[in-house]
Amino acid sequence: MAAEIHPRPQTRKPVLLSKIEGFQDVVNTAVIIPKEDGVISVSQDRTIRVWLKRDSGQYWPSVYHTMPVACSCMSFNPETRRISVGLENGTVSEFVLSEDYNQMTPARTYPAHQGGVTVVLFVLEMEWVLSTGQDKSFTWHCSESGQQLGTYRTTAWVSGLQFDVETRHAFVGDHSGQVTILKLEQDNCSLVTTFKGHTGNVTALCWDPVQRVLFSGSSDHSIIMWDIGGRKGTAFELQGHNDKVQGLCYASHTRQLISCGSDGGIVIWNMDVTRQETPEWLDSDSCQKCEQPFFWNFKQMWDSKKIGLRQHHCRKCGQAVCGKCSSKRSTIPLMGFEFEVRVCDSCHDSITDEERAPTATFHDSKHSIIHMQYEPTRGWLLTSGTDKIIKLWDMTPVVS
């Protein structure tokens, strides 16, 4: 069922430790069990499985439980061994695992949503179960009484959720590309603010309570770091994926961000550098370098007897330029551009070799990732792919 892999150690690359196979459909969420050689998975094939590593070195299911409908998401609390599973029929089902992880006992069911559950979080400090759904709602329940404490209607299908225990702020990302911050109380909530920076769905959120920064990933292939603690509205873009970003995790002890995407990429971002905000794109009817008219500027085209040109923008200064004045490409890592992007000729000449030094490393997981989880104690990363396989990686060579 699960073949163990013994790769030759490679410097500064994630090391593939094991593969877990045998699923009939994709694994929507899986987590590494801290202090155990084990993994918990929930799948589109309706199964909840607890995998423990045997003496043979292979992972085999010690618990195999079939739900009435597909399992869409899951949250695991190691202290209470409580599993909260979101289902496609809108309910959240809770189970408690035995100390040896060989048995699973049903605990409670919450009728949380009218559509499929997209994210579920159990907050031990508050005894709250937070969940979001395809019904455009965010709800929270009391895990002791089972009662619904409150709900908030969102503008679009919710796809990301994080919670800050200290301030009771919930960060909710949705399919419109918006991130909403809510202040939760025992039985109500208030809207704090909203962020809009993505042109696609918000597909992943990651909150770091120490640095007080929020990372959002999107189907537009980008990541945005929102500096909440700085209180200046600062946001930094990170462009390092060729497909939608599916998972984010921040290793605060090394100040590195781990991102995974549908392109199969695992990207390690160095966040211990002074990053720069990307400029706003400027509007102009003519090239701001050579003053040639753009193709919609009929008056200047007629007056100058010149053919209108297509408008482009320099990614470093934001100026509107023609193709001739922006014929060169460059990486700008401190602005988050790890791939070469269009820059005007003068900006290209001003970028130094030091400014072109990469701030991220790129690694191929060899499967299209739909979910990831990082376990910082051992430095292990779990990825789940469209190939119905879970992979376990040792990240210590690159996250250190």
Image: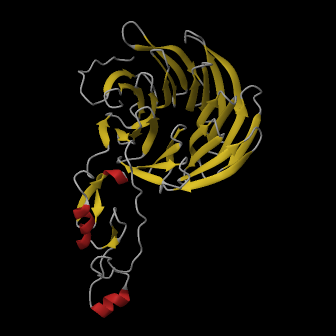
Please count the marks in the image. Answer: 0
Write the residue at 22% across / 63% down.
Answer: 349
Q: Relative to the observer, which residue lies in front, 81 or 316? A: 316
Compared to residue 69, the image places residue 203 above or below, namely below
Left or right relative to 26: residue 318: left
Looking at this view, name the residue that lies furthest to the top. 55
Left or right relative to 171: residue 267: left
Position of the N terminus, as image quadrant, is top left
Left or right relative to 321: residue 146: right
Residue 363 x, y percent position in the rendering: 30, 36
Residue 334 x, y percent position in the rendering: 34, 51
Residue 160 visible (yes or no):
yes
Write the residue at 27% across / 91% down.
Answer: 305
Looking at this view, name the residue that lies furthest to the bottom. 303
Residue 113 visible (yes or no):
no
Coloration mode: secondary structure
Compared to residue 45, the image places residue 160 above or below, namely below
Compared to residue 344, the image places residue 62 above or below, namely above
Q: Based on the displayed image, in which of its 4 quarters is residue 385 positioned?
A: top left
Residue 103 x, y percent position in the rendering: 59, 11
Position of the C terminus, as image quadrant, is top left
Write the residue at 29% across / 82% down.
Answer: 292
Q: Relative to the observer, which residue lies in front, 341 or 209? A: 209
Write the residue at 45% across / 36% down.
Answer: 250
Residue 295 x, y percent position in the rendering: 34, 80
